[in-house]
Amino acid sequence: TLDQLITGSHRRADHVIIRDGARAGERLPLIGGTLTLDETDGIRATGSLQLPPIGWLIDYLDPLTTRVELDVVLAIVGDDGTTHAWRKAVVHATAMPIEVSATGGLQVQVQVADRADWISKTGMREHYAGSGATSIMTHAIRLATMRAPWLPIGDITDPGYTAGVDLLVGGVGEDPWSEAVRLAWSVGQRLYVDADGSLASQSVLMPDRTDARWVSGEAGCLISSMSTERSDADVCNALGVEWEEPRPDDADEGWTPRGGVEWWVDVDGPLGT
């Protein structure tokens, strides 16, 4: 049962997988650290990872040398040996990794962030010019990928609004990611990089209530500013696992297994745990 998985003899097997270079595919255990996933931030995934003190690791992840990305994977090994794994983010080192002393010995500490951070720091080489007849969301996508043409395009919602006049955005050295996020926000979309490393968007409006509405058919129907508030007072951690009873040896031919979803709810633990 799920309760047994949570309280039983399962073990955490969180790890990172190197995505690039000669060591692509290698898996390193996560000794500790933090990974913050903030849906309200333009750069959703940031954190500090603690990895084993492997001799080549510091130079290999040095962001001044090359951009090497890591899959951050949360994994649980059940009592039966089955591993349940979830990729939480695709990240890269934002500073030179350092070796630190901790309980149990030395560790390599790596400050990380997702691909939005890399795009943000590349800087624009020229201003961006776009047609007023093209949707604003298309311009946002082009801005986000102008310095990262390799960025996969994931689940994007384009409301179809246009500016009605040609756009001239940014300039040399300015932040292309912030400009892209600003354009997407103006048509009610929050631009971000998802857990798979793809460019995605979601509505800035909560799906279960209406804070604002769009007026169709009017030119220049954009958001100039919006204030949102959230409370975590009634939020809890919940984890559900599907289950199905095993077939008895003496079961009839028409036997149908019972099953369902068992939920584990924690109202006291810290959010995001």
Image (spheres, rainbow, N blue to C red):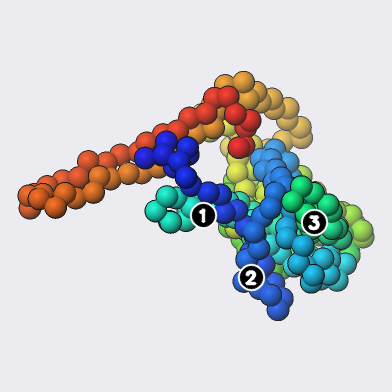
Dots 2 and 3: beta carbons under 8 Å?
no
Q: Quadrant of residue 260?
A: top left
User: Which numbered disc covers residue 167?
Assistant: none
Disc 3 designates what residue?
106
272 versus 98 height, above or below? above
Would you say the residues marked 1 and 3 are in contact, meaning their CB atoms lie under 8 Å apart?
no
Q: Are marks 2 and 1 in contact (CB under 8 Å)?
A: no
Q: CA distance from mark 2 to mark 3?
A: 20 Å
Q: At x 76% / y 32%, what residue is drawn?
A: 225
C-alpha gap between disc 2 and disc 1: 16 Å
The label shown at residue 26 is 2
Q: Is residue 73 left or right of residue 252?
A: right
Q: Which residue is mark 1?
A: 85
Tell us which disc is closer to us: 1 or 3. Answer: 3
Q: Nearer the viewer, mark 2 or mark 3?
A: 3
Q: Of the residues shown, which amino acid type is indicated by label 2?
A: Glu
